[in-house]
Amino acid sequence: MKIGNPNTPDCDFFACFHLNSRFWYPIHWNAEETPESEWFSYDRNKEFEELYGRDSDAYRIRVLGEFPLQDPNCVLSEELVLGVMGNPSLMQKCVRLGRVGTGKPVKQFGIDFARFGGDESTIFRRSGYHVAEWARYSHVDPTHVVDKAYHMQRMTSWPDSGTWFVADAGGMGQGIMHRFYEASKNIVEFHSQGRPFSPDFDNRITEAWFNFARLVKARNCSLPKDNLLAAQLATRRYYTTRKGKLIIESKNDYIKRGYNSPDRADGCVLCFWDNVEATGNISAGHYSPHAVGQV
């Protein structure tokens, strides 16, 4: 049995009510519906409403007995992420969306290569703003990951001229970029610490995460339903530098907080990187595929 205040989504207690709820019998007390006692009073509820507002996380936690909608230090909340996962009507809308800023159809892959043996390499394929297919790999050479991405492209009959690959070019990705050039692919070598387009961000990966977050909040993207992907997207924190720029926490810092490497989340975010024509180049194991409403 676990009893406590729902203070943060970044804890095992939160998982008991959400991702792991099938293993628990979760209950909660709503102070608005509880008779007055030494623990609950209507005056206390009113005080919290006047101080913070009924829509605030403080009111949700202390009066309604609900978890906050978002960790104030996280880019996205689980509620927002789950709202764009596995939704057929949203999928139909997002398939038709053209690339932001150009309106052009989108045929794009996001690839994140595993850094270490226990990490995952991930591929996400999107049509419009819908992730139509994704795959994860463990203990697989990055050359095989690239080959699988090419296989996905062939199976969907996407032409090289209209298909973009956004690939993590750091770490294990450094030695594999030549494969894209040799195959004459449209390739964006994505460098996480590269210079962002906007002065609001400290680096390019932070900018990519916040650009993706805008799509999620506007419900302008459609994602596969996957608990681990949802957890990774909803628990990545960000900070403000001394120069006032936003910066997302590093993978190492994220892992130090008790999580596995956020490989699925990063692959998904790269898949939705929209600045391909400004940053790209046109160039002269274990496998688990997940088809999600093929398009």
Image (spheres, helix red, strand yellow):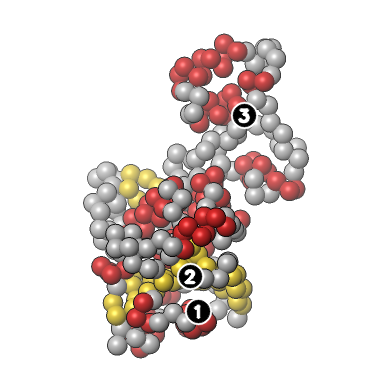
Q: Left or right: 256 with respect to 39? A: left
Q: Which mark sits nearer the N-terminus, 1 or 3?
A: 3
Question: Residue at 25% of width from left, 58% of height from top?
Answer: 197
Quick one: SS at disc 1? helix
Disc 1 residue type (three-letter): Thr
Q: Which mark sits nearer the N-terminus, 2 or 3?
A: 3
The answer to which of 136 and 293 lies nearer the viewer is: 293
Q: Dividing the picture into quarters, in which one does residue 41 lie?
A: top right
Q: Gap in Å between the C-alphas at discs 1 and 3? A: 48 Å
Residue at numbered disc 2: 125
Q: Position of residue 85 (x, y in %)?
A: 56, 55
Q: Position of residue 143 (x, y in %)?
A: 47, 83
Q: Position of residue 265 (x, y in %)?
A: 49, 60
Quick one: SS at disc 3? loop
Disc 3 residue type (three-letter): Gly
Q: Which mark sits nearer the N-terminus, 2 or 1?
A: 2
Residue at numbered disc 3: 65
Look at the numbered discs 2 and 1 and tell me whether their residues touch, using CB distance below 8 Å: yes
Question: Residue at 64% of width from left, 45% of height from top?
Answer: 18
Residue at numbered disc 1: 156
